[in-house]
Image: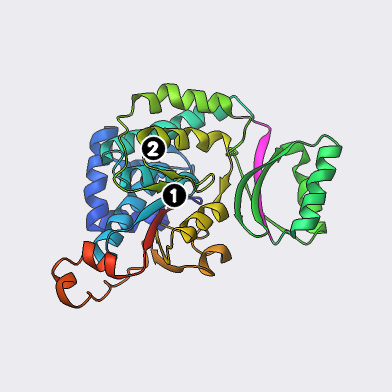
Amino acid sequence: MGPTRFRELGRFLLLDSRAKKLLSVADDVLGHSLFDAFRQSEDAYDPAAQVAFMVACTALAERAREELGEPVVCTGASFGEKPVVGFSGALDFPDTVRMTAGLARCTAEYFAHEHRDVVTQSFVRAPAGPLAELFADMDARGAWHEVACRLDEGLQMVSVHEDGLERFQKELRAIGALPLYVMRPPMHSSRFTGLRELAAREVLDALPLRDPKLPVLADQDGAELTTAAGLRQMLLDHFVRPVDWPATLDALHARGVERLVVAGPDALFGRVESATSRFEVVPVTPDHRPGPRPAAAGPAAARPVTDQAAARPASAAAGV
């Protein structure tokens, strides 16, 4: 999930038939108009923005399922864990809304008081050897740093103390890397055990999670999850373990997946080289509508969802 603005998603949420139905359910769960709250939001990651993003991902995943057939596995990077848990069948949509809103509130509450001096810096084009030396130098001088997301070769997000951010940015440039945006609050750090405990106590312990109907690959390491307990662990690890998107893509590739259907607004996860070099990436975004694939000849045409999927290379769905 990148910064989500109303002007980018509002029209889709208002006009798409699937999104409108999901918005109505979300309104009932939240007790207010999600569309209005999202429109009035001034924070790109507040609960309204996060639930609106989840609604968009879910609507687009349903579109992909209807038009492209059933996936064989699904995954979601970082925030994408939330729509994927619902899409997999492990939660009904109303409970997915409750989970998304509740975790967003916990995160805001936690970082209002904790780790206010920590930010997460994203960067690209960092050569592996010099980056390892940079990290070693930081270790030697006691400058704390922790990888939050591994996204592709040379593309990472790293958390640091804010008072060392400017120096870190200069050191990145010195090795030929390009610093991108800074995230506040930060994300995915072993230091955030208090947030993990808060999320478990306030949100996840009350969720009626069930075993998913569709296998889920954990975005921390690509492990296959087929039980409610495994999904709960993934959601809790979200706070304290880094996302490893290349490892997740490796796991998809090892399963024989050839087509990656990215359902949701995406400026990153479906575009990195580790995805585009090994998969046919099919974006299903608010501004991109893929046409349905031709039905296979014979009996498959009579049952276009399951049999078309069986007749084609295996595909995976990813919420982002």
Inspect the image, locate mark 2, and give the three-letter code of the amino acid beneath it.
Answer: Thr
Q: Is residue 159 above or below residue 131?
A: above
Of helix, strand and loop, which one carries label 1?
strand
Earlier-in-chain disc, 2 versus 1: 1
Residue 42 percent location from the top left of the image: 47, 43
* Quarter of the image where one finds residue 189: top right
Q: Nearer the viewer, residue 107 or 14?
A: 107
Of helix, strand and loop, which one carries label 2?
helix
Q: Which residues are magenta?
A: 116-124
Residue 150 percent location from the top left of the image: 61, 51
Q: Is the magenta region chiefly helix, strand or loop?
A: strand
Q: Residues within 10 Å of mark 1 (few under 14, many from 20)?
A: many
Residue 253 percent location from the top left of the image: 48, 61
Q: Residues within 10 Å of mark 2 (few under 14, many from 20)?
A: many
Marker disc for residue 100: 2
Based on the picture, tell me whether residue 118 belongs to the magenta stretch.
Answer: yes
Residue occupying the point 48% across, 23% down: 198
